[in-house]
Amino acid sequence: MEAPCPRFVYSSKDYIHQVSRRENDHGCPPQMSKFDSSIRSGWEERMQRGLFRYHLGALETRILPGQARLVAQLNIARGQQRRKPQEILSIRQDFNPNVFNFNKANPGEPIFELTNQEMPASEVTKCCKMMVNVSPLEFGHSLIVPEPRQCHPQVLTPHSIQVGIECVLLSADPGFRVGFNSLGAFASVNHLHLHGYYLDHELAVESAHAAPVAPARGLFCLSGFPQGLLFYTEGKELQAVVKTIHAVTDFMVKHNIAHNLFLTRGCPPEAESARDNRRAGVRIIVWPRLACFGAKEETGFNVALCELAGHLPFKNREEYEAATEDSVHGTIRKYTLPTESFLNLQTKLICHLSQDATNHSH
C-alpha cells in the first residue's frame, strides 16, 4: 500500500506579494511562508534520513564577470551519482511504464500533496505531489509531479503550468525557482514533472528588458541573449495567463520544437529600468531551442532550464574554473534557435494566438 502523503492546502489568499532576499537590511533572514517551511523542513528531514544519493552542502559558487551576472556553481556529486538519464528519441515520446517513473520512487520521497481549495469541482481529483529530487542541484531541489498516477508523458498541461506558477507565488523567498525541460531539451525522465529549488542569487532574467510581441495576450520577448518568450502574472486572471502559455507550448510540441521554461520572481515586463527591484509577480520564460536526442552526457555542461536562466551547475572543476561569460554564451548559442528561426516562430505564434482567441470567442 502507498504511504499516506500529507496535504498542503492553499488558495489564492496564500499568494505572497511582498518578498525580500535571504539577507534583509538588518542582516536577518526574512520570514518564510507556510509553503517554504513545509518544503525546507521536509527536505532537510529526508536529507538527514539518507534518502538522497549524496549529501549536499554549501556549493562553491562564483559570479562570472560580465553584464549577464551568470551564477556558476560546482556540484561534482550530481554528475557522478545521479540516476542515468533515459534515452529520449522524440518530443512526443509515449510514457513507458517499464522504465523508471515517479510512481516507482522511494515512498519516503514525497513531501506533501498540493491541494488548491479553489480548484473547480470538475478538477478536484487532480492531485500534485511535491517530492525531493534525490540528486539535488541546490538546496530544496524538489520535483513537482502533477497527477502522477495518470502517467502523463513530459508534455506540459494547463494544470502543470498553473501549479508551477502557484508554487512561486506561495513562496516568500525570491530565490525559489521553478522550471521545466521538454523532451529533446534535456529532460531526464519521461513522466510529467517540473523542478523547484532555492537559489540565493539574483538572476538577470528577473529584470531583463522585454519588448511586446502580442501584448493583448500578455506575450513579450526578452531583448537580450538568449532570446526567450516572456509572460508575467501577479496571480490575478491566472487562468488566462495559463491558457496562453499552454497555447504556446502546445504549438511547440505539435511542431516538434523542444523548449525549456523558467519561472521566477521578477518585475513587470513594462519595467523601464533593468534594475527594477519589484518582485510582486512571476516571470514565466519559454525558450524554444534546438532538440537534442539520446541520453545526455552526465559530466558535461548541458544547456537546460537552469543554464538558459543564467544559473550554471558545473559537474567538474576544470569547466567551472575556466568558464567565462563568452565561453558559456558560446555553448548556449549551439542549442538555441538562430535569430531568423526565432523571429519566424514568433510570427507564427502571433498568428496562432490570434486564431486561438477567435476560436474561443465564438
Image (tube, rainbow, N blue to C red):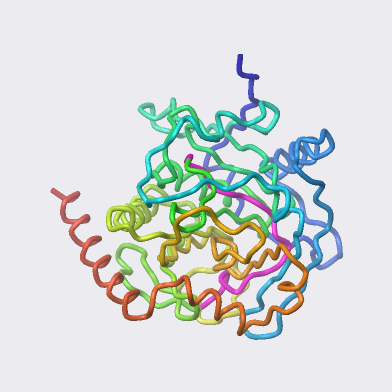
Residue 235: x %, y % from top left: 48, 52
Residue 153: quadrant of the picture: top left
Q: Nearer the viewer, residue 298 or 245?
A: 298
Question: Range of the magenta residues?
Answer: 191-208
Left or right: residue 324 compared with residue 24: left
Q: Residue at x 45, y 50 (%)?
A: 88
Q: Residue at x 37, y 55 (%)?
A: 245
Residue 309: x %, y % from top left: 57, 67
Left or right: residue 116 compared with residue 277: left
Residue 232: x %, y % from top left: 46, 62
Confirm whether the magenta stretch covers residue 146: no
Residue reaching furthest right?
Answer: 27
Residue 231: quadrant of the picture: bottom left
Residue reaching furthest top?
Answer: 1
User: Which quadrant: the N terminus?
Assistant: top right
Question: Compared with residue 350, is residue 111 higher up or lower down, i.e. above or below?
Answer: above
Confirm whether the magenta stretch covers residue 197: yes
